[in-house]
Image (cartoon, rainbow, N blue to C red):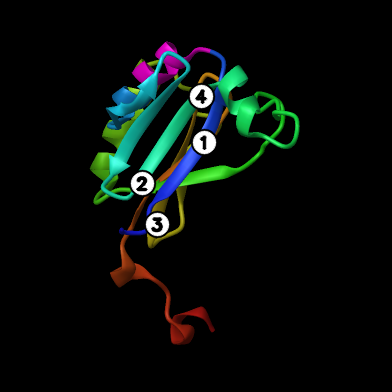
Amino acid sequence: MAKQVFINLAVKDVERSMSFYTALGFTNNPQFSDDSGKCMVWSDNIFVMILSHEKFASFATKPIADTKTNLAALYSLSLDSIDEVNELMTAGLDAGGIEPHEMRDYGFMQQRTIEDFDGHSWEVFFMDMSKFPTEQQKG
């Protein structure tokens, strides 16, 4: 079996969150979804499980963080162009997401941030490795 990444997020409204992640370009895998959780697919090996607080708590060994006021983690999604980044951000903002600050441009990478309804932060970026600084350019 291929190595896979499953990111599990506690959300207050599973259906509303599913709509948001669908707007970002995720698809739902109904085989691993029910009323208390949805498996959202980013790629063949990357999945986001959006789980009700009750379902999430059944797996957790610590209290669920309030991600509206505290940062628990940063999740990042790479895309193939700055146009794709901007399209995803527009769709996410139209679906109710929040952009907490302006785009960051590092020369070789442009990055934007979007938060879902529960405050989970996603860094969406395009990286052009041909513009990545070399050791000689840094000095």
Q: Answer with mark 3 or mark 1, whichever residue precedes in sequence.
A: 1
> What residue do we see at 61% from left, 20% from top?
53
Q: Answer with mark 2 or mark 1, whichever residue precedes in sequence.
A: 1
Is residue 122 visible from the viewing direction of this image?
A: no
Determine which residue is flagged by label 2: 46
Distance, label 4 to label 1, CA atoms, is 7 Å
- Name the element at disc 1: strand
Determine which residue is flagged by label 3: 109
Mark 1 neighbour density, 10 Å: few (under 14) some (14–19) many (20 or more): some
Do the CB atoms of the residues marked 3 and 2 lie less than 8 Å apart? Answer: no
In the displayed structure image, the side of residue 73 where residue 124 appears, left or right: left
Mark 4 neighbour density, 10 Å: few (under 14) some (14–19) many (20 or more): many
Most foreground residue, 55 or 76: 55
Mark 2 neighbour density, 10 Å: few (under 14) some (14–19) many (20 or more): few
Q: Answer with mark 2 or mark 4, whichever residue precedes in sequence.
A: 2
Location of residue 52 in the rendering, given as x and y in whole percent from the top left corner: 54, 19
Most foreground residue, 85 or 18: 18
Distance, label 2 to label 4, CA atoms, is 16 Å
Q: Quadrant of residue 91?
A: top left
Label of residue 51 in the image: 4
Q: Amino acid at mark 1?
A: Asn
- Name the element at disc 2: strand
Select label 3 or label 1 by which is in front: 1
> What residue do we see at 61% from left, 18% from top?
54
Most foreground residue, 93 or 44: 44
Instruction: Determine if the magenta segment contains residue 108.
Output: no
Question: Magenta span covers which residues?
Answer: 13-20
Location of residue 122 in the rendering, given as x and y in whole percent from the top left corner: 48, 38
Q: Amino acid at mark 2?
A: Ile
> What residue do we see at 31% from left, 62% from top?
128
Q: Answer with mark 3 or mark 2, whichever residue precedes in sequence.
A: 2
